[in-house]
Amino acid sequence: MNFCPKCAGTLEERILEGKTRQACTVCDFVFYRDPKPVAGVLAFKGEKLLLIQRGNEPKLGQWSFPTGYVDIGDTPMETAVREAKEEADVDVELDRLLGVYSNENRTVVLIIYVGRVVAGTPAGRAEALDARLFTLDTLPELAFDHDYHILEDLFHQNTDS
């Protein structure tokens, strides 16, 4: 962002509260760049995991879990279910929350659930080129580093139970 949303003055970077933030040179308004909530699901059908082949940047053409932005008025759970339908043409039921993921460089807070495919045959739709079920030992290369971290959390939680 280049201009203040309050007075249209120029924004400049300053160290505030121990972090680099944008502040207005005219009215001193501080522009906080807040992350957006994203929800998704690790959906299984039997022993196979549903993945979508991304149809947009970043990581166009690479494989990941169905995820999407949480719309105003929707819960993260509703979003995870909706994204599986929109991107992979399957109905899912959520079993549990796996975790919430973020870091200081990420522009999203990622909320991931574990669930089951209960209806439909995976097919790429909306923002996905393709959708398929993979056994865990035949997963393709995944789009994001955090995808591997999420899978590690899944395996760790499953061995602790």
Image (spheres, rainbow, N blue to C red):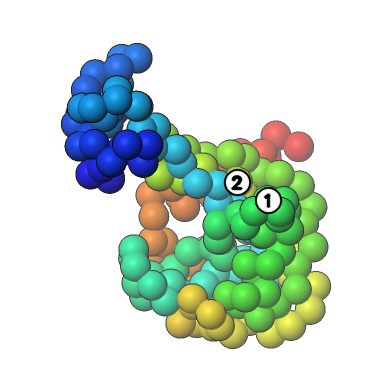
Q: Quadrant of residue 49?
A: bottom right
Q: Quadrant of residue 3?
A: top left
43 and 22: which is toward the camera? 22
Q: Residue 80 at x, y = what percent?
A: 66, 59
Q: Residue 52 at x, y = what percent?
A: 52, 72
Q: Quadrant of residue 144?
A: bottom left
Q: Which of the two discs, 2 and 1, labels the residue nearer the N terminus?
A: 1
Give SS at disc 1: helix
Q: Is residue 123 above or below residue 29?
A: below
Estimate the spatial distance between the alpha carbons at disc 2 and disc 1, rounded to whole Å. Answer: 7 Å
State whether residue 134 appears in this view: no
Q: Which residue is disc 2 drawn over? A: 111
Quadrant of the image containing the C terminus: top right
Give SS at disc 2: strand
Question: Would you say 155 lies left or right of 81 here?
Answer: left
Q: Are marks 2 and 1 in contact (CB under 8 Å)?
A: yes
State whether residue 30 appears in this view: yes
Question: Would you say 120 lies left or right of 105 here?
Answer: right
Q: Is residue 45 above or below residue 24?
A: below
Q: Amino acid at mark 2?
A: Ile
In percent of the image, x 36 and y 41: which residue is there?
5
Q: Residue 44 at x, y = what percent?
A: 69, 65
Q: Which residue is disc 1 drawn over? A: 76
Q: Is residue 134 above or below residue 144?
A: below
In percent of the image, x 55 and y 83: which residue is there?
125
Q: Is residue 92 above or below residue 128?
A: above
